[in-house]
């Protein structure tokens, strides 16, 4: 593997010390720069053309992406991109980043991103609870962590808020929007069942108060075949005595109060508990 191939493997940006540790000489690095295969960003830092800006920012700050900034690099769900970079920096950092200092696991990917456990713990301590729950739920669904494992790294009173976020995670969601909706409905005191298999209807996203079906539609629901299937399910649900509401991502994430108001409009007077 030549130096540029290794650099691509390492995230397309790295410190020259990292390249030397991988067995490349200063001459290997200099020749690649002179040939235009990579560029020197500053003394001790090189990158390939097109390197991801957030990875470049991490290396220039002598840190590792973490928290919400690292979620997509670990294939985790994320609701919103953070306004500033979140970095694990053991020493120093740029002034325009959010710095996380604590680390409990070694880096487990070759590019400048903190280990998965550190990313999740930083998110639990730092992000709004819904965004942190979304990230943890995706890791849980992939079988890459457990709630007990994360709780074990969150001792004491100072981590009480982070542990409470873990109580919101149950591993039943099929998408980020389902996590948001589940927390939204439960925060309203509704009796919420998720992924319920109803005879003659199939599995529904939510069953509220045992009679209101709420379905969350992604892009696939716009396809003609899926539209026909959804119509048949809606009809079957109504014939079996259920009410049905359907919402998309933007409605749940950006206009949750309207969703809540409409749900309560259907539930009002029908709650049997």
Image: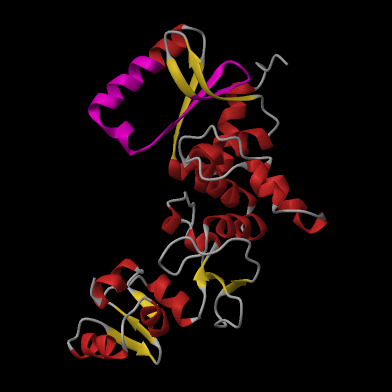
Using the rendered view, name the quadrant where residue 53 is placed.
bottom left
User: Which is nearer the eye, 179 or 46?
Assistant: 46
Q: In the displayed structure, would residue 17 be above or below residue 237?
A: below
Residue farthest toward the front in the current orientation of the protein: 23
Q: In the displayed structure, would residue 81 be above or below residue 212?
A: below
Residue located 55% across and 37% down the image: 181
Residue farthest toward the right in the current orientation of the protein: 157
User: Which is nearer the eye, 49 or 152?
Assistant: 152
Q: In the displayed structure, would residue 244 be above or below residue 178?
A: above
Where's the N terminus, which quadrant? Answer: bottom left
Side of 234 relative to 140 (left or right): left
Using the rendered view, name the quadrant where residue 186 is placed.
top right
Q: How is the image coloured?
A: secondary structure
- Is residue 54 visible to the viewer in this orientation of the structure? yes
| Residue 194 placement (x, y as % from top left) | 55, 26
Side of 91 relative to 70 (left or right): right
- Is residue 84 visible to the viewer in this orientation of the structure? no
User: Which is nearer the eye, 219 or 86?
Assistant: 86
**Total labels drawn:** 0
Q: Which residues are magenta?
A: 205-233
| Residue 113 placement (x, y as % from top left) | 47, 65
Residue located 29% across and 26% down the image: 226
Q: Is residue 202 magenta-colored?
A: no
| Residue 195 placement (x, y as % from top left) | 51, 24
Where's the C terminus, which quadrant? Answer: top right
Side of 8 relative to 197 (left or right): left
Residue located 53% across and 49% down the image: 135
């Amino acid at each position: 593997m030549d130096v540029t191939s290794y650099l691509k493997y390492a995230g397309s940006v790295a410190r020259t010390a990292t390249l030397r540790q991988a067995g490349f000489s200063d001459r290997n690095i200099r020749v690649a720069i002179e040939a235009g295969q990579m560029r020197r960003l500053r003394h001790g830092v090189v990158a390939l053309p097109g390197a991801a800006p957030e990875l470049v920012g991490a290396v220039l700050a002598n840190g590792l992406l973490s928290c919400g900034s690292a979620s997509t690099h670990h294939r985790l769900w994320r609701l919103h991109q953070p306004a500033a970079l979140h970095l694990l920096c053991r020493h120093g950092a740029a002034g325009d980043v959010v710095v996380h200092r604590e680390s409990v696991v070694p880096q487990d990917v070759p590019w400048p991103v903190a280990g998965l456990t550190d990313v999740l713990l930083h998110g639990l301590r730092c992000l709004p609870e819904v965004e942190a729950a979304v990230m943890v739920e995706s890791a849980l669904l992939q079988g890459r962590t457990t709630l007990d494992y994360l709780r074990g790294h969150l001792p004491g009173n100072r981590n009480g808020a982070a542990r409470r976020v873990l109580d919101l995670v149950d591993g039943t969601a099929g998408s980020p929007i389902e996590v948001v909706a589940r927390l939204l409905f439960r925060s309203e005191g509704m009796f919420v069942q998720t992924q319920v298999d109803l005879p003659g209807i199939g599995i529904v996203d939510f069953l509220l108060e045992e009679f209101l079906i709420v379905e969350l539609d992604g892009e696939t629901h716009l396809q003609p075949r899926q539209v026909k299937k959804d119509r048949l399910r809606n009809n079957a649900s109504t014939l079996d005595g259920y009410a049905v509401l359907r919402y998309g991502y933007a409605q749940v994430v950006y206009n949750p109060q309207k969703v809540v108001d409409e749900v309560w409009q259907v539930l009002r007077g029908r709650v049997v508990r």
